[in-house]
Image: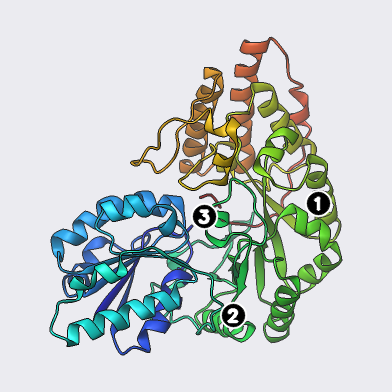
C-alpha cells in the first residue's frame, strides 16, 4: 500500500507532523512518501500522489488549513481513487469544510495511532477485493484521540534537508542550522482564543524522553546546532521538560535551543529558569497577546500586564531573552491602546525582541473557538466564513482597521527589503502616531523612541511565530 503524507506549512520547521507518523506507518509495511510543500514543489510529488492509496494532509495551524483547499483539488484530479485524510490540530476544528473537500477521515489530538489504524483498515479492505476508497463509511466520523501513546522516534529520512528550513540568525548575520522537535502536545490551560483548547480540553500528552532525545540526536547528526521545541507550553510538565534539557546538555554541551512558555508558567516556575539558561536556552517565546487588562480577561490568559513586565525583568536578569507574541488588533483595540502597546515595547526595551509581524496580527476566531462562549463575542461576529475559516468581525472604529492594514503593509515591505526590526518599528510608530494624532489630537513623546538603545545580542528565528 502506498501512503503520501503532505505538509503545506509549518512555520518554516521540518515537520514533526510528517516524521512522526512516517515512523509509525513504516511498521505496517506500506510505502510512505513525505512531501513538504513549504519547501518542495507540487511537481515533485505528482508520481507519488498518482500511485497513492492514501493521501493524508497535516493541518497543525490555520494557515495550512487555508492553503489546503486548492491543493486537494489538484490531488483529486491526479488520483480520484485515493482515500483522503486530514489530521492535526485544525482538522477536527474544520470538519465540515474538510468533508466538503472530499475528506473521508478526520483525525485530531494524538493522531499517530489513528493513522496506523486507518492504514491497517484500508489494507485489510483492499485484501478483501475492494478498492481502499470504499472504506469511507467506517471512517466518516472525526476522531479526536487523547490516548497516551508510546511514541516512536520520528523518521526524518524522507524529508528535505535542514538547511531548507528556518534558521537561527544572529545580529552579525551568521546563522545556525536549526532542528525542530516536540516534547509534549496539548495544554492544561484553557485560554479562550487558543485552538489547542477545543481539541485537548485542558489536557496535555508527553512525548517520552528517550524519543525526544533520539530525535534531537539524529538532527544533530544531520548538522543541527540549535533546536526549537514546538510544545504549546514547555512547562506544562516542568519536571519532564527539565529532565530533557538536562540530558540534552550533558550529551551536547554546545547545542542551543528555544522553548515556548506562557507568562503564568514562567512566574510559577521562576526557580527553573536559570536551569534553562545553563543548559543552552537562548530565548523563550511567550504568547503575551495583549497588554490591555480587559482584553487579557476576555482571552482568559491568567496573567496581567504587570506579570508580563515582571517576566521581562526576570528573564533578562538571568541572561534569557523573551520573544513575546501578540494579537495586536482585536475588536477591543483602540487607537490609544495600540499607542500604549507600542510605548510599552519601547519602555521595556523590546524592539529587537519582537518579530515585526506581531505588531500587525489580527484576532482570528475560528470554528469551535472558546471565545464564542462569550455573548460579547457572539454579538460582534458575522456568519462563519468558510473560505477564510473564521467568524469575521469589523472594528467599530474604521480607523483601527485601516491602521491594521497599513501596519501589515509596512511590515511586509520592511521584511521584503530586509530592514532591521528597529527600522520597521520606526515605520509602525510613525503610522500609529499619525493616525492617533489625527483622530484624537494627542501628541506622542517622539523622543522616547529616539532614546531607545539597540540591543545587539538578540538572536531570532528567520521564520517568525504566527498561526
* Mark toward the viewer: 1 or 3: 1
Marks 2 and 3, the one that precedes in the sequence: 2
* Secondary structure beneath label 2: helix
Please indicate whether residue 98 sits to the left or right of residue 198 in the image.
left
* Label 3 SS: loop
Q: Which of 332/354 is in front?
A: 332
Ranked by sequence position, the earlier of labels 2 and 1 is 2
In which image quadrant can residue 141 be found?
bottom left
Give the side of residue 135 with respect to residue 154, left or right: left
Name which of mark 1 and mark 3 comes first in the sequence: 1
Residue bearing the label numbered 1: 311
Say which quarter of the image contains residue 348: top right
**Mark 2 burial class by Cα count in 10 Å: few <14, some 14-19, many 20+:** many
Q: Position of residue 84 (x, y in %)?
A: 27, 65
Residue at numbered disc 2: 212
**Residue drawn at (61%, 46%), measured in percent from left and top?**
192
Disc number for residue 463: 3
Describe the colour scheme in one phrase: rainbow
Percent of width and height locating residue 180: 54, 70
The alpha-carbon separation of the residues under discs 1 and 3 comes to 24 Å
Amino acid at each position: 500500500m502506498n501512503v503520501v503524507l503532505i505538509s503545506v506549512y509549518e512555520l518554516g520547521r521540518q515537520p514533526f507532523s510528517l516524521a512522526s507518523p512516517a515512523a509509525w506507518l513504516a511498521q505496517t509495511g506500506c510505502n510512505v512518501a513525505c512531501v513538504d510543500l513549504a519547501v518542495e514543489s507540487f511537481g515533485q510529488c505528482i508520481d507519488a500522489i498518482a500511485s497513492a492509496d492514501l493521501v493524508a494532509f497535516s493541518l497543525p495551524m490555520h494557515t495550512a488549513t487555508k492553503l489546503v483547499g486548492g491543493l486537494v483539488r489538484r490531488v483529486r484530479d491526479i488520483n480520484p481513487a485515493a482515500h483522503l485524510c486530514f489530521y492535526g490540530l485544525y482538522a477536527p476544528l474544520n470538519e465540515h469544510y474538510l468533508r466538503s473537500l472530499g475528506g473521508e477521515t478526520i483525525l485530531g489530538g494524538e493522531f499517530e495511532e489513528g493513522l496506523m489504524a486507518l492504514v491497517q483498515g484500508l489494507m485489510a479492505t483492499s485484501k478483501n477485493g475492494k478498492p481502499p476508497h470504499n472504506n469511507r463509511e467506517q471512517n466518516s466520523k472525526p476522531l479526536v484521540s487523547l490516548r497516551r501513546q508510546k511514541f516512536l522516534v520520528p523518521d526524518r529520512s524522507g524529508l528535505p534537508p535542514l538547511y531548507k528550513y528556518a534558521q537561527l540568525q544572529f545580529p552579525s548575520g551568521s546563522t545556525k542550522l536549526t532542528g525542530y522537535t516536540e516534547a509534549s502536545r496539548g495544554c492544561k490551560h484553557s485560554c479562550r482564543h487558543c485552538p489547542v483548547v477545543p481539541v485537548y480540553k485542558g489536557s496535555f500528552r508527553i512525548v517520552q524522553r528517550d524519543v525526544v532525545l533520539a530525535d534531537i540526536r539524529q538532527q544533530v547528526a544531520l548538522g543541527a546546532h540549535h533546536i526549537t521545541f514546538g510544545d504549546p507550553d514547555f512547562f506544562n510538565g516542568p519536571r519532564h521538560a527539565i529532565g530533557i534539557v538536562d540530558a540534552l546538555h550533558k550529551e551536547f554541551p554546545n547545542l542551543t535551543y528555544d522553548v515556548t512558555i506562557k507568562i503564568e508558567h514562567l512566574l510559577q516556575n521562576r526557580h527553573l529558569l536559570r536551569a534553562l539558561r545553563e543548559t543552552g536556552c537562548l530565548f523563550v517565546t511567550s504568547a503575551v497577546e495583549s497588554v490591555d487588562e480587559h482584553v487579557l480577561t476576555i482571552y482568559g490568559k491568567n496573567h496581567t500586564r504587570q506579570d508580563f513586565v515582571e517576566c521581562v525583568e526576570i528573564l533578562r536578569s538571568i541572561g534569557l531573552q523573551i520573544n513575546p507574541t501578540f494579537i495586536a488588533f482585536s475588536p477591543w483595540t483602540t487607537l490609544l491602546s495600540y499607542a500604549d502597546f507600542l510605548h510599552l515595547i519601547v519602555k521595556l526595551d523590546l524592539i529587537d525582541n519582537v518579530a515585526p509581524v506581531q505588531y500587525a496580527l489580527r484576532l482570528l476566531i475560528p470554528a469551535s473557538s472558546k471565545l464564542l462562549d462569550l455573548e460579547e463575542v457572539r454579538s460582534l461576529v458575522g456568519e462563519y466564513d468558510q473560505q477564510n475559516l473564521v467568524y469575521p468581525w469589523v472594528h467599530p472604529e474604521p480607523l483601527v482597521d485601516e491602521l491594521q492594514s497599513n501596519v501589515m503593509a509596512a511590515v511586509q515591505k520592511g521584511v521584503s527589503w530586509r530592514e532591521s526590526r528597529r527600522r520597521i518599528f520606526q515605520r509602525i510608530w510613525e503610522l500609529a502616531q499619525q493616525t492617533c494624532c489625527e483622530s484624537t489630537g494627542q501628541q506622542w513623546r517622539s523622543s522616547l523612541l529616539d532614546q531607545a538603545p539597540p540591543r545587539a545580542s538578540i538572536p531570532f528565528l528567520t521564520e517568525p511565530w504566527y498561526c
